[in-house]
Amino acid sequence: MDSSNQEIAYDFSPFFIVYKDSRVVQLKGNVTVPPSLDPKTNVESKDIVYLNTENIDLSARVYIPESTHQNKKLPLLVYFHGGCFCMESAFSPTYHNYLNSLVAEAGVIAVSVEYRQAPENPVPCPHNDSWTALKWVTSHFNGQGPEDWLNRHADFERVFLAGDSAGANIAHHMGIKHGLEKLESSFINVTGIILCQPYFLGEEAVGDEITNDHHKNLREKLQGLWRFTCPSSTSGCDDPWINPAFDSNLVSLGCNKVLVFVAEKDFLRARGLYYTEKLKESGWRGDVQIVESKGEDHIFHLINPTSETAEAMLKRIVSFINKD
């Protein structure tokens, strides 16, 4: 092989490497699993296509508890996976297993969204795809959509948006867009948004980004990654896509309540705390709650979902969804 083909242009390990011949090699999140009836949770899943054009074919995975009665309505959870907008998949073993557990514990019907990713499809493409998926999901509000599970079981008066890391960023922006544009007018009620260790950044350091040298190094790496995944931005890490504090529409977040999870050792902890403060200061009239997991790091609940802290986090999400 020509040695020039092995020359690295950008090294964003452990996420991906870009070579000078424009090849992009993903280092994580490449393995996928099919939908199934999960024997541990008795949750059934299937894949649906939410966008099909000549050049684009995008899918999502729908989950439902097997014990659901024929016409019983369940809260609807729309989930967006993480991965810095450039890796992972709604169909990976990590997310498939997590959604099975979450659906079983919360007693919800869930849609886990697959979206196109950077660098081939830079931000805001992941957000645009997610909005397309969300509009497809909520088009079932009158029971006349193409997916029978959603027609029969989704309660569109109890809709929740959720995600981890970059997926939490997307969930936040879906809430903003709903607040501005409204999904199916008054027929859809986005009750709450769940943000698990959200992926937000900023040009100026906040909190322990200032004092923690390890976090400072990670922050610099993520700033470089952000500029690579959103090359059209003219404001760097103060772009509203990555820094909600610079979004004049923050007050328009279209839900009644928000639950933010941060982890004590996570380099994004300071940003989660900062987001909560700015949301309160914006004039938004909902209720925002923050939960910190002591001794844990980024996406610990996906890496070790059976740990005591991860199980406590899952119970907190279930309570948030099912509390009147």
Image (spheres, rainbow, N blue to C red):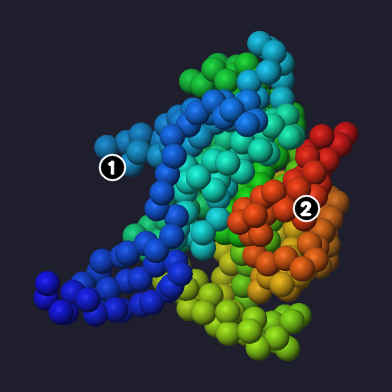
Above or below for 38 versus 91: above
Crowding at dot 1, Cα within 10 Å, few <14 / some 14-19 / many 20+, comes out as: few
Q: Quadrant of residue 32?
A: top left
Q: Quadrant of the N terminus?
A: bottom left
Answer with left or right where residue 261 lies relative to residue 215.
right
Which type of secondary structure does the marked residue at label 1 adopt?
Answer: loop
Pinpoint residue 105: horizontal percent, then vertical percent.
73, 35
The CA span between labels 2 and 1 is 45 Å
**Residue reaching furthest to the top:** 70
Identify the mark nearer the N-term, 2 or 1.
1
Pointer 2 residue:
308
Residue 150 makes an appearance in the image: yes
Above or below for 23 versus 51: below
**Residue reaching furthest to the left:** 2
Pointer 1 residue:
55
Answer with left or right where residue 23 lies relative to residue 3.
right
Which type of secondary structure does the marked residue at label 2 adopt?
Answer: helix
Pinpoint residue 276: horizontal percent, then vertical percent.
79, 64
Above or below for 317 versus 14: above
Crowding at dot 2, Cα within 10 Å, few <14 / some 14-19 / many 20+, comes out as: few
Above or below for 148 versus 211: above
Pinpoint residue 114: horizontal percent, then vertical percent.
47, 44
Residue appearing at x 76%, y 80% in the figure: 207
The type of residue carrying mark 1 is Asn
Q: Quadrant of the C terminus?
A: top right
Residue appearing at x 51%, y 79% in the figure: 221
The type of residue carrying mark 2 is Glu
Residue appearing at x 68%, y 67% in the figure: 297
